[in-house]
Amino acid sequence: MDSHLNRRLALAAALSVALPLSALPLAAQAQTASAAYPTKSITMVVPFPPGGLADLVARPVAEAMSRDLGQPVVIENKGGAGGGIGMAQVAKATADGYTILMALSSYSVIPEADTILGRAQMYSFASLRPIARFTADPTVLAVRAESPWKSVKDFVDDAKKRPGAINYGSSGNYGTMHVPMEILAQNAGIKMTHVPFTGAGPAVVALLGGQIDAVSSGPATVLQHVKAGKLRVLAHWGSAKLDALPDVPSLKDAGFNAEYAQWSGLFIPAATPEPVAQRLRAAARVAANDDKVKQVILNAGSPVLYQDTPDFEKYVQGDVRRMSDVVKKIGKVE
C-alpha cells in the first residue's frame, strides 16, 4: 500500500478518536449517547401531587429502576389539569431518556377533552410512547365513616332526592377521579356537584376534613384511611372482587352498568432512541418483578399487574377508544 495513503489513514483515525461528540453527525451523536446511557440522573415526572396512586407507584418503581440503571431516578411531582400539565412536560421534553413519565389512565382522556373544550391539545397520543404498565385497579367509591350512607343504594337514593347536593372531589376535570363518577351519574340518573383539586391526595384530604362528601379513587389512595376507620368504601367500578376490599360489592352487583379501571404506567417521549427505550423497558421489567416493589404497592392496596411494552401499547390503544366515547358523553365541562 502507498506510504502516503498509510499516513493519511492513520491521521484520519487519530482525528476521529480525538473529535468531541458535538463534532460528530447528529445521528452518530445519538447512537454514541444511547450506547453510554444513562450517564446522569433521570427525572420521573409524576403528573399529580404526592399522595395519589401515581406517586405511590412511582416511588418504589423509581428506587428499583435506579438500582438497575446505576443512576438516580428522581421523582418530580408536577400536578394540575388532571395530569395534563405533567404529561405535556414529558411530551415536549428532549427525547434522550432523561425525562420519563409515570402516568395514570387520565392519559387516555385529556386530548379528547381538550378537543371538546375547543382548546389546543396539551399533548398528543403520538408524542408519548408506552413502555410498561404497573397497576390496573378499579376505582372505589369512598365516603367518610360517619356519613349516613351505608351502601351505594343509600348514596344513589339520596342523590336522587337532592340533585346536586352531594359533592365529590377529583384530581381535575376529565381526570381519573372525575370520569368514573360521571359514568355512575349517567347510569344511575343522578346529578352531583364536581369539585376539582390538583390531585388525589388533596381530594382525599378534603374528604377527610368534611369539605366534600365522596371521591372515586384508586384503592391505594384510601385504604389506610379505611383501615383507620375514617373512611367507608361503598362500591367499586370493577368486575371481580378486590383483594384489598373483598367485602365491597361492585357497582354491577348493585345494578349499575358502570365500570372503570385506573391504571399506572411508564411513558417516554416518542422520539427517544430505540436503544434507550429498550434499556428503560428492561429496567421497568426488573422493577415490576422486584419483591420489595410488589410488597410496597400491595401494602398500599394495589397488586402489581405488569404489562410489557407490546401488550401495554395494545391496552392503551383500547383504553383511548373507550375513554374517548365516555368523554364525548360527558361533554363540555368548564
Image (cartoon, rainbow, N blue to C red):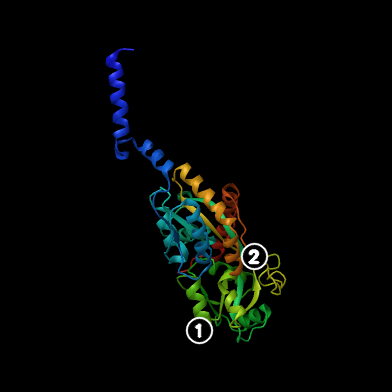
Whole-angstrom CA distance, mark 1 to mark 2, is 28 Å
Depth order, front residue of 210/276 = 276
Question: Count of labels shown?
Answer: 2
Q: Quadrant of the N terminus?
A: top left
Q: Is residue 91 visible?
A: yes
How many neighbours does mark 1 have within 10 angstroms: few (below 14), some (14-19), or many (20 or more)?
Answer: few
Q: Is residue 195 visible?
A: no
Q: Are marks 1 and 2 in contact (CB under 8 Å)?
A: no
Q: Nearer the viewer, mark 1 or mark 2?
A: 1
Depth order, front residue of 269/253 = 269
Q: Is residue 156 above or below residue 58?
A: below
Q: Position of residue 117 (x, y in %)?
A: 45, 62
Q: Position of residue 186 (x, y in %)?
A: 61, 70
Q: Which residue is mark 2?
A: 259
Q: Earlier in the sequence, mark 1 or mark 2?
A: 1
Q: Position of residue 252 (x, y in %)?
A: 70, 69
Q: Quadrant of the C terminus?
A: bottom left
**In percent of the image, x 64 and y 78: which residue is there?**
156
Q: In the rendered structure, which amino acid carries the disc numbered 2? A: Glu
Q: Is residue 168 above or below residue 85?
A: below
**In percent of the image, x 43 and y 49: which residue is there?**
97
Q: Position of residue 144 (x, y in %)?
A: 58, 82
Depth order, front residue of 160/210 = 210
As helix, strand or loop, the secondary structure at mark 1 comes to: loop
**Residue with the most extreme top position:** 2
Q: Which residue is mark 1?
A: 209
Q: In the rendered structure, which amino acid carries the disc numbered 1? A: Gly
| 41 sits left or right of 158 in the view | left
As helix, strand or loop, the secondary structure at mark 2 comes to: loop
